Image (cartoon, grey):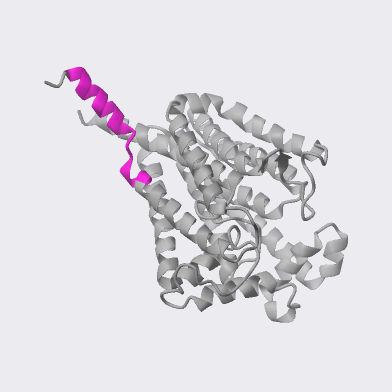
């Protein structure tokens, strides 16, 4: 005979079984391991990246489970401390000696510790999302009736919170990662309820600055480098706008990735049949491996998986907004993080975006990117758990 206590315990445990998130995670893991396994046949490196990726995903799953011990109220209270800890690590990175934070490819972005490396900027993305969400929630509680003045004040706070880590990351320098932060903040600002007059003026102003900066770099590339813009960044922008006018060295990454993606045609070449070698196949250009191995059909399936996850995050955020705006903005923030990474990574493979070192989250190989993504995944999983609990209480 089943006791009432056993039934209650079983029901409580069922809150933590979010089937849609679990199935999507398993599918992404399978795609990631298959793609990395195929990329390894190019023999660029000696390491077993599939085994290492399994380790990262296993650690990530443990992190997701650990996050479930904290409720939204605890995360809300801890968000300022988590944010400032992330900022502190970014600052420490810049002043650390070369022995533990050496400069690689002109950027000081990693702590190189015995046996592993850590990229603080990846984890600071999640801490920034948490603090932005908490700031909006706290502001809305304090100012129940919004006005131009209060909305401008909120916008100023969100900009300051975003620009502190962005400026530190630009000092590394890592322009691509900094742009990710700005995109996330922009999406959260748009969804924060700030008056559209303010947002419209902000969009026009930023668009004008970006257009002017790009125009200046294209028109005066040498002067742009003299003013501090790295030569490789100028080359990437020029290649993005007009690849035909650039040298084969400048377009090498794009040409190879595009060739691999297109050579897969409709159904791909299958497992173990890659024929187009190109650099960073297991990380930045993993989508080209998918295209060559599994063709247009396989690539479309991967994009559909991302669509399903993004759709789930949108609906989750909208559903939880009424009883927890903080949880909703966590969902929107993680959605923004995934969206910019997917759009930029696949876009650079297709040639519609400039080449950057932004990985395809949940698929590309990487320790810091996988673990930080799993932290974000754990947070939205917790949001889904609390939403299920809330619905259960409402409809009893």
Q: Residue at x 45, y 74 (%)?
A: 268
Q: Is residue 98 left or right of residue 114?
A: right
Q: Main secondary structure of the magenta part?
A: helix
- Report the number of numbered marks: 0
Q: Compared to 268, does 50 lie above or below? A: above
Residue 352 vs 146, above or below: the answer is: below
Drawn side of residue 266 relative to residue 88, left or right: left
Which residue appears at 58% of the width and 55% of the height? 359
Which image quadrant is residue 392 in?
top left
Q: Residue at x 50, y 55 (%)?
A: 363
Is residue 5 part of the magenta span, yes or no? Answer: yes
User: In the displayed image of the protein, which residue is found farthest to the left?
Assistant: 1
Quadrant of image for the C terminus: top left
Q: Is residue 147 above or below residue 227?
A: above
Relative to residue 323, is residue 272 drawn left or right? right
* Residue 127, x across and y down, in percent: 58, 36
Q: Residue at x 63, y 61 (%)?
A: 280
Q: Quadrant of residue 225?
A: bottom right
The quadrant of the picture occupied by the N terminus is top left
> Residue 290, how many percent across, how many down?
49, 66
Look at the image and tell me whether residue 97 can be seen. Answer: yes
**Residue 329: in sight, yes or no?**
no
**Percent position of residue 15, x then y:** 31, 32
On whether residue 38 falls in the magenta region, the answer is no
How far from the left and from the top, in percent, is residue 44? 65, 62
Q: Which residues are magenta?
A: 4-22
């Amino acid at each position: 005979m089943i006791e009432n206590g056993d039934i209650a315990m079983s029901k409580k445990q069922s809150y933590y079984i979010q089937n849609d998130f679990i199935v999507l995670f398993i599918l992404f893991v399978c795609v990631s391991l298959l793609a990395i396994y195929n990329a390894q046949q190019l023999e660029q490196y000696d390491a077993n990246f599939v085994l290492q990726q399994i380790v990262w995903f296993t650690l990530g799953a443990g992190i997701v489970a650990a996050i479930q011990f904290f409720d939204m109220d605890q995360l809300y209270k801890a968000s300022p401390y988590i944010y400032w800890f992330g900022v502190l690590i970014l600052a420490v990175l810049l002043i650390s000696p070369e022995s533990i934070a050496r400069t690689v490819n002109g950027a000081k972005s990693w702590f190189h510790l015995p046996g592993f490396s850590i990229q603080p900027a990846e984890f600071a993305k999640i801490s920034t999302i948490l603090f932005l969400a908490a700031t909006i929630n706290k502001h809305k509680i304090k100012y129940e009736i919004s006005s131009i003045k209060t909305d401008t004040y909120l916008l100023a706070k969100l900009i300051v919170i975003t620009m502190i880590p962005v400026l530190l990351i630009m000092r590394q320098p890592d322009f691509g990662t900094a742009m990710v932060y700005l995109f996330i903040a922009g999406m959260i600002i748009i969804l924060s309820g700030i008056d559209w007059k303010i947002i419209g003026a902000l969009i026009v102003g930023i668009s004008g600055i970006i257009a002017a900066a790009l125009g200046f770099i294209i028109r005066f590339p040498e002067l742009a480098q003299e003013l501090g813009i790295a030569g490789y960044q100028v080359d990437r922008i020029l290649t993005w706008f007009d690849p035909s006018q650039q040298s084969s060295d400048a377009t090498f990454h794009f040409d190879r990735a595009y060739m691999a993606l297109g050579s897969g045609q409709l159904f791909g070449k299958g497992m173990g049949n890659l024929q187009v070698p190109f650099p960073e196949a297991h990380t930045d250009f993993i989508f080209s491996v998918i295209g060559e191995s599994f063709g247009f059909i396989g690539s479309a399936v991967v994009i559909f998986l991302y669509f399903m996850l993004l759709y789930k995050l949108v609906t989750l955020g909208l559903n939880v907004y009424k009883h927890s705006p903080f949880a909703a903005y966590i969902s929107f923030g993680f959605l923004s993080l995934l969206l910019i990474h997917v759009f930029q990574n696949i876009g650079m493979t297709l040639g519609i975006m400039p080449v950057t070192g932004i990985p395809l989250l949940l698929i590309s190989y990487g320790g810091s990117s996988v673990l930080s993504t799993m932290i974000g995944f754990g947070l939205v999983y917790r949001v889904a758990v609390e939403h299920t609990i809330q619905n259960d209480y409402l409809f009893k």
